[in-house]
Amino acid sequence: MSPVARLAVGFCGLGRMGLPMAQRLLHAGHELHLWSRSGVAPEVLGHTTGARGIACASPADLAARCDVVLLCLADAHAVEAVAFGARGLAQGAARARVVVDHSTLEPSTTKRLAARWRDGTGGHWIDAPVSGGTAGARAGTLAVMAGGDAPTIDNLRELLSAYAARVTRMGDSGAGQAAKLVNQIIVMTTIAGIAEATRLARGAGVDAARVPAALQGGWADSVLLQTLMPRMLEPPAEASGTIRTMLKDLDAVESFAAEHALRLPVAGLVRRWLTQAVAQGLGDSDISQIVRAPLD
């Protein structure tokens, strides 16, 4: 692979997470080719970077122009369609041989897609889900958990440093996705605990708004406590991550656990809570609003 500074970079997916990641790539001076399923115009990137991406007509068009393609898409269906569907990346992959998938998928799905990409193009598929939310994407402090070919991941580190503070290779294909599911168990069970603590504080007549400061520096302190409890008390105008998205990830956790004959009772209970929240119409609400959903 060419040195990172000489790469033409493709980016598919300008959603809540993808947009600030693409903005940081432009800010870092990369030549950025863009395609979005939602039809977001690349001009939107210029609002914060002063630079513009190069619009592409299709994923195949993008792949034909780029050395490496980054994906940040909603789910496995979207990833497979962009990579292998009509006018997908694989049809233009004479140049783009490396795909870095920042989406969160089941490890078995990633392994299947990686094998299909390798067999069809001779290239590398790196599963590289991220943690840190939209705030981390904007600040360039995301954590990337990567699975796949070690030399390829090493060659990508400089490129990914535009929006990631840390890139850790977890193992072969699928290992990055497995690590992300571990991350999601920790994140979501912690958020559920914070929601219950918020309810308890309110029920006991304690000023819940003072709890994050009171616990700062103690064992109960965390980024999630400091970020999410205030959002539980005063719902944000815009979701930084939705209940529906987290449920999708815990569905993947349940499937992965079943595949390995593992019982995860706490994660299973939280998944049931998220399922009920979606059924109650809270699916597109910020994840903090799990506090509003009763659990039968």
Image (cartoon, helix red, strand yellow):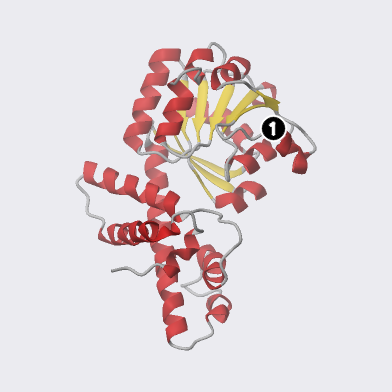
Query: From the viewer's perspective, is 29 left or right of 160?
Result: right
Residue at 54%, 63% (x, y): give it: 223
Quadrant that contains the N terminus: top right
Q: Is residue 141 above or below residue 113?
A: below
Amino acid type at image mark 1: Pro
Query: From the viewer's perspective, is 27 left or right of 188?
Result: right
Q: Tag 1's secondary structure?
A: helix
Quadrant that contains the C terminus: bottom left
Quadrant of the rendered image containing residue 81:
top left
Q: Is residue 196 above or below residue 24?
A: below
Q: Nearer the viewer, residue 214 or 273?
A: 273
Residue at 59%, 57% (x, y): give it: 238
Q: Is residue 209 above or below residue 127?
A: below
Residue farthest to the right, as pictured: 50
Residue labelled with disc 1: 42
Q: Nearer the viewer, residue 50 or 56?
A: 56
Residue 50: x and y in percent read 80, 38
Residue 217: x and y in percent read 55, 73
